[in-house]
Amino acid sequence: MPEGDTVWRTARRLDEALSGARLEHGELRVPAFAAAELAGRVVLETLPRGKHLLTRLSGGLTLHSHLRMDGAWRLYPAGDRWTGGPGHEIRAVLASATTAAVGYRLPVLELLPTPAEPDAVGHLGPDLLGPDWDAAEALRRLRTVPERAIGEALLDQRNLAGVGNVYRSELCFLTRVLPWTPVADVPHPERLLRLAQRLLEVNKTRAERCTTGDRRRGRMLWVYGRHRKPCLRCGTPVRRAEAPGPHGSSRPLYWCAHCQR
């Protein structure tokens, strides 16, 4: 599932490509909204909210989408061939005179009145990359269930919006706690939140995510994806385990048994 920084970049690309443009063609290939008339509407803006995308259109409508594991928005100059996947995977098309934004494999796609946006994203906690980021409120939400494992709590978008599987492993490593540590036992959780916000902020404009400060290939992440490879800090082989994820899925957790205790 994309992290908040990836979604932020997607929103920026959509915003730069379409904002202010009138749609010459608009199509939603999902049964509930297949008859929606979008052609002629002006795209006002596209905003990220955690891992959600909100594309606001003239006439008081918002197209809400979520990428989850496999979804993607691709941009093509008008007239170019769409190469992001087979046609049956296309869920949305927003095309102006110059650009086509094509949404592939979008598991969440709905058209709603703009005033009803809170129905779709109002449950989310403070957005790490949002103008309203509130570390104190995020900490309060984390502490609501003090016995919950910190790795699980970080993935819960109701606590704070934007952390995905990569960042939860990296944040636990950087704060030297095991992902199964109860929230109540995490020392200085406010430092963890500062790190989370800083890491997403510095990576939001990067094509390749880096948490170590070392941009060399194979050294950009401390533990994520490094199963059995030596820890970049101490040399101990990195471990991996499966843990429950959102929507009934499982997600890999990575940690260093020496650095995290």
Image (cartoon, rainbow, N blue to C red):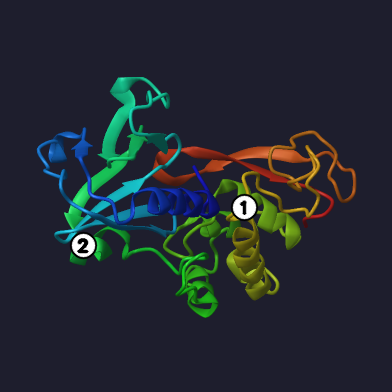
Task: Specify whether residue 34 is in view.
Answer: yes
Residue 62 sits above or below residue 26 on the image: below
Q: Amino acid at mark 1?
A: Tyr
Q: Earlier in the sequence, mark 1 or mark 2?
A: 2
Looking at the rendered image, the disc whose residue lies closer to the viewer, 1 or 2, is 2
Residue farthest right in this picture: 234
Assign a secondary structure to mark 1: helix
**121 to the left or right of 213:** left
Q: Could you say which is closer to the camera, residue 239 or residue 21?
A: 21
**50 to the left or right of 218:** left
Residue picked out by circle 2: 114
Residue 144 sits above or below residue 63 on the image: below
Q: Could you say which is closer to the camera, residue 256 or residue 129?
A: 129
Task: Specify whether residue 106 is in view.
Answer: no
Where residue 51 appears, as percent x and y from the top left, is 43, 53
Where residue 46 appears, as percent x and y from the top left, is 35, 56
- For the point 28% across and 33% down, the residue is 91
- For the point 42% across and 24% down, the residue is 83
Where on the picture, by quarter, is residue 181?
A: bottom right
- For the point 45% across and 75% down, the residue is 132
Where residue 217 appears, as percent x and y from the top left, is 78, 38
Q: Amino acid at mark 2?
A: Thr
Density class for disc 2 (Cα within 10 Å; few <14, some 14-19, many ≥20) is some
Where residue 215 appears, as percent x and y from the top left, is 78, 47
Q: Could you say which is closer to the camera, residue 172 or residue 195?
A: 195
Residue picked out by circle 1: 167
Residue farthest bottom in this picture: 136
* Real-space Cα separation, disc 1 to disc 2, in angstroms: 31 Å
Q: Could you say which is closer to the camera, residue 155 or residue 101?
A: 101
Q: Quadrant of the C terminus?
A: bottom right
